[in-house]
Amino acid sequence: MSKFVISTSSFDTDNNPPIQHLIQKGIQVVTNPHRRKLTEDEIIELLAEDATGLIAGIEPLTERVFSSAKNLKVISRCGAGMDSVDLEAAKRHDIAVFNTPEAPAQAVAELTLGLILAALRRICQIDRSLRKGEWPRIQGNLLAAQLVGIVGLGHIGKRVARLCQAFGAKVIAYDPYINQPPADVPLMPLTRILTEADIISLHLPYAADTHHLLDTNAFARMKSGAVVINAARGGLVDETALGDALNTGQLGAAALDVFEQEPYQGPLLTCDNIILTSHIGSLARESRQRMEVEAAENLLQGLIKTGLLNGR
């Protein structure tokens, strides 16, 4: 019996018509037993040699993985980012790769807005103080008074721009891959984003050339008291440099939903002026359901196109 693997930390198979269709076809489904991001060795073990399809999370899908998974023919990313997939290796092994770029966009954009507002008004800091028996009167800032710099103006970045504009904020952006941004979002060089924006929000994929895009030099260029938001990929930010910038007061606040190593257990946990969330960007019920159904449909259609499944 052929099988397919779902490697995401959670996945609702019961309420997913394409998954149920695959099961009815006699295909075995194997889910992630660890309920977290898998290591390279763990995904190799899960796929073994008999998996024909994979609904992927953010585990590393490398040449080594593909060489081990002899029968793997279709990968369907449950999400937008493809930086965890070695696309060239997948092509060499004749593996079709799909993703769901639109499905999680609104959820990540809304989380980003929530992080921005929480950082500006010091909501989490005040909550912690109140629970200690204090009654803090901390003055925050209005989003309407900020210049927001969006780095990466794709599906998510455009939504974040619109949400910030709805609050009255001005928005500028950096994205070297688009030529026609929204008329009310001027494109600028990254250097100007860093030096002029009050809030800098990252919405771009991780790659070798974006590794530690925000490092010590980048933080030094920013306005004193600037706010940094990262709900994209952990490797975009040098976490050690970020901690230093927060502790010295160069940055006013930061919020991270993603980290270089997850689950995160590093020194940023001791910083009082940072908000940390556990990679929950897409975990809004409506978006997650859409993303899972689209990922399963992509897998189903991929298996049909490769001739591994009868389309009827």
Image: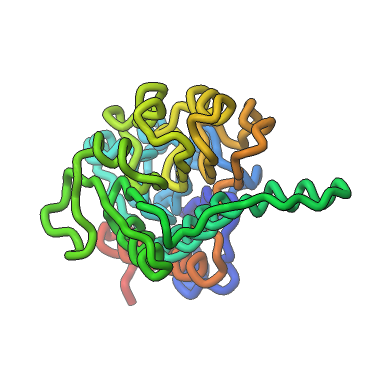
Q: Residue at x 42, y 58 (%)?
A: 145
- Total numbered labels: 0
State the image coordinates of residue 56 (x, y, percent, origin top left).
45, 49
Viewer-side residue, 170 vs 137 = 137
Determine whether, in the image, residue 249 is placed left or right of residue 197: right
Q: How is the image coloured?
A: rainbow
Q: Which residue is drawn at 35% across and 66% down?
A: 165
Quadrant of res 310: bottom left
Residue found farthest to the left: 179
Residue found farthest to the right: 133
Q: Which residue is drawn at 36% across and 52% down?
A: 148
Compared with 91, 121 (above or below) is below
State the image coordinates of residue 75 (x, y, percent, origin top left).
36, 50
**Residue 183 visible, this orientation:** yes
Quadrant of res 82: top left
**Residue 28 visible, this orientation:** no
Q: Residue at x 56, y 41 (%)?
A: 37
Viewer-side residue, 23 vs 252 = 252
State the image coordinates of residue 216 (x, y, percent, origin top left).
41, 22
Instruction: Quarter of the image for the C terminus: give it.
Output: bottom left
Compared with 73, 90 (above or below) is above
Compared with 303, 265 (above or below) is above
Viewer-side residue, 16 vs 252 = 252
State the image coordinates of residue 269 (x, y, percent, origin top left).
67, 33
Determine whether, in the image, residue 40 is placed left or right of residue 158: right
